[in-house]
Image: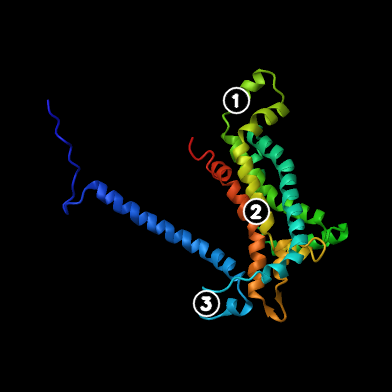
Amino acid sequence: MTTVPRSQPTSRAGRTVSDRHRARNIVLTVITYLIVLAFLFPLAWMILNAFKTEAQAFATPPVFFFTPIWDNFQRALPSYLPALANSLVAAVGSTLLAFILGLPAAFALAVYPTRRAQGVLTWMLSTKFMPAVGVIVPIFLLFRNLGLLDTRLGLILMYTTMNLPLVVWMMHSYMSEIPFAIYEAAKVDGASVSQEFFRIALPLSMPGVAATALLALIFAWNEVFFALNLTSADAAPLSVFIGEFKTSQGLFWAQLSAAATLVVLPVLVFGWIAQRQLVRGLSFGAVK
C-alpha cells in the first residue's frame, strides 16, 4: 500500500501556510529588535559619552568614532565610593526591614483575612498614590526633630515606608495562590501558625520573595526625591552624587555620563544575575 504525500494548504496567491507563518515570524522578530534597540539606545549612548571628552560629548553632529579616555571615571571615583556605600546600606537595609515587617502582614492578610482585610490592602496601596512632594514638609520636620536628617538610618526608614506597601501587596498575592488545603492539612497535623508561615508559606513563596526583593532594591536604589531633601553630605546616596555634576559653571556631560554608568552598573549586574528568579517570580500565579 502506497501513501500519498500530504500537500500543504495554499492560499489564492499560491503561498503556503508555512510561508505566511515564516514571514510573520520574521516581521515580529524585526519589530522586537527595533523595540529593544529603542530601549537600549539611551543607555548605550550614555556609556559611549562616558569615554569622550567634554567637547566630543557636546559635539554636533554627534561623534561616533573617537579615542576612548578614562579621565571622566577617574574624576568621578573619589566621590562615587562613599555614595555607593550609602546606597548599598540604604537599599539593602530598607529591603530587609520591609520584608521583616511586610511578610507576616502579607501572610496574615492572605491566610487569616478579617472583614477589613481588603480595606487594609486598599489603604496601603492608596499611600502610593500620594505625590512625594505633598508629604515632604511633615517628613522633613519629623526627621529633623528626631535627628535623622542626613543619616543612613533615616534613609533606611524612609525607603522602608516607601517599599512596605509593595512588599505586602506582592507577597499577599503570592501567598494567596498557595492552595488552602495545604494549610488545612498542616493544621490537622498539629502545625502552629508560625510553623505554617515558616514551613509552608515562606518556602512556597520564594520565587515571589526573590522578585519582590529585586524590585524593592531597585526602587530604593533609584529613589531621588527623598534622598535630595533628607540628605546632604554624610548619607548622600548615588542619586545625590549624580546631581553634583550639574554646577553653576554648566553641565559636565561626559563626567555625568561616567558617573551615571557607575551608578547603573551594579543594578545591571544584579539584574542580569537574578533575571531567572525575577521572570519566574513575576510570572508566578499567572497560569493556574
Look at the image and tell me in which quarter the N terminus lies: top left
Tell me residue 96's x, y (percent).
Answer: 73, 45
Disc 1: which residue: 182
The numbered mark at residue 62 is 3
Horizontally, residue 233 falls left or right of residue 108, namely: right
Task: Give how far apart the Cα atoms at labels 1 and 2 are.
Answer: 33 Å
- The residue labelled by disc 2 is 218
100 vs 106, nearest the viewer: 100
Residue flagged by tag 1: what amino acid is it? Ile
Q: Secondary structure at mark 2?
A: helix
Q: Mark 3: few, some, or many residues within 10 Å (few <14, many ≥20)?
A: few
Please state the horizontal and vertical placement of residue 176, each as a whole percent of the image: 59, 35
Q: Residue at x 56, y 64 (%)?
A: 43
Give SS at disc 1: helix
Q: Is residue 20 left or right of residue 45?
A: left
**Mark 2 and mark 3: span between their CA atoms?**
31 Å
Tell me, yes or no, if residue 151 can be seen here.
Answer: yes
**Coloration of the structure image:** rainbow
Camera-nearest residue between 287 and 203: 203
Dot placed on the residue nearer the N-terminal end, 3 or 1? 3
Identified by mark 3, the residue type is: Pro
**Residue shown at 58% from the left, 73% from the top:** 67
Note whether 29 is above or below 41 in the view shown: above
Disc assigned to residue 77 = none
Asked if 266 appears above or below 200 in the picture, the reply is: below
Question: Residue farthest to the top?
Answer: 189
- Mark 2 residue type: Ile
Residue 105: name its quadrant. Answer: top right
Q: Which residue: 56% across, 35% down?
A: 177
Q: Are marks 3 and 1 in contact (CB under 8 Å)?
A: no
In the image, residue 236 above or below residue 7: below
Query: Of all residues shown, which one is farthest toward the left?
Result: 1
